[in-house]
Image (tube, helix red, strand yellow):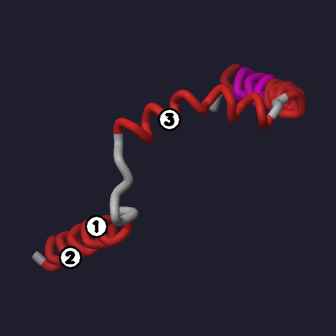
Amino acid sequence: MSQDVETRTKYWIACWKQAGSAMNALKQAELSKISTMQALQNLSGAFESCRRQFPLRRSSGLVEQQAWFQKMYTLQKTQRHD
């Protein structure tokens, strides 16, 4: 790595470390101002819309998910032995 590239790389690393600290401080400040009740009220319309549009299922889908994982595992296992 040339000296110029190394210098620029170190500069960018330092910049992102500083930016990361500033962004974390901003995040903490914003989180401390959040009202849980206001957030729930803001999201209630979206929740009700989804609840009406997508009726409850009898299953969480976990059984179907596990069946897909088993199919993928079996397929990968078969492909490795070919």
Magenta stretch mostly in which secondary structure? helix
Q: Work out whether residue 14 can be spotted.
A: no
Left or right relative to 58: residue 31: right
How far across and how far down the image is residue 26, in percent? 85, 25
Q: Is mark 3 on a helix, strand or loop?
A: helix
Q: Which amino acid does label 1 sit on?
A: Glu
- Residues at marks 1 and 2 touching, judged by CB atoms closer than 8 Å: no
Tell whether position 12 is magenta: yes
Left or right relative to 47: residue 8: right
Left or right relative to 31: residue 40: left
How far across and how far down the image is residue 18, in percent? 85, 27
Closer to the camera in the image, 60 or 3 = 60
The N terminus, quarter of image = top right
Pointer 1 local density, CA inside 10 Å: few below 14, some 14–19, many at least 20: few
Q: What residue type is labelled 3?
A: Glu
Disc 2 to disc 3, C-alpha distance = 40 Å
Q: What element carries label 2?
A: helix
> Which residue sits at x=28%, y=67%?
64
How far across and how far down the image is residue 70, in percent? 26, 74
- Identify whether 56 is placed above or below 67: above
Q: What element carries label 1?
A: helix
Q: How many marks?
A: 3
Disc 1 designates what residue? 64
- Identify whether 80 is placed above or below 54: below
Disc 3 designates what residue? 48
Residue range in magenta is 6-18
- Residues at marks 3 and 1 touching, judged by CB atoms closer than 8 Å: no
Q: What residue type is labelled 2?
A: Thr
Number of the front mark, 3 or 1: 3
Tell whether position 15 is magenta: yes
Which circle marks residue 74 in the picture?
2
> Which residue sits at x=34%, y=58%?
57
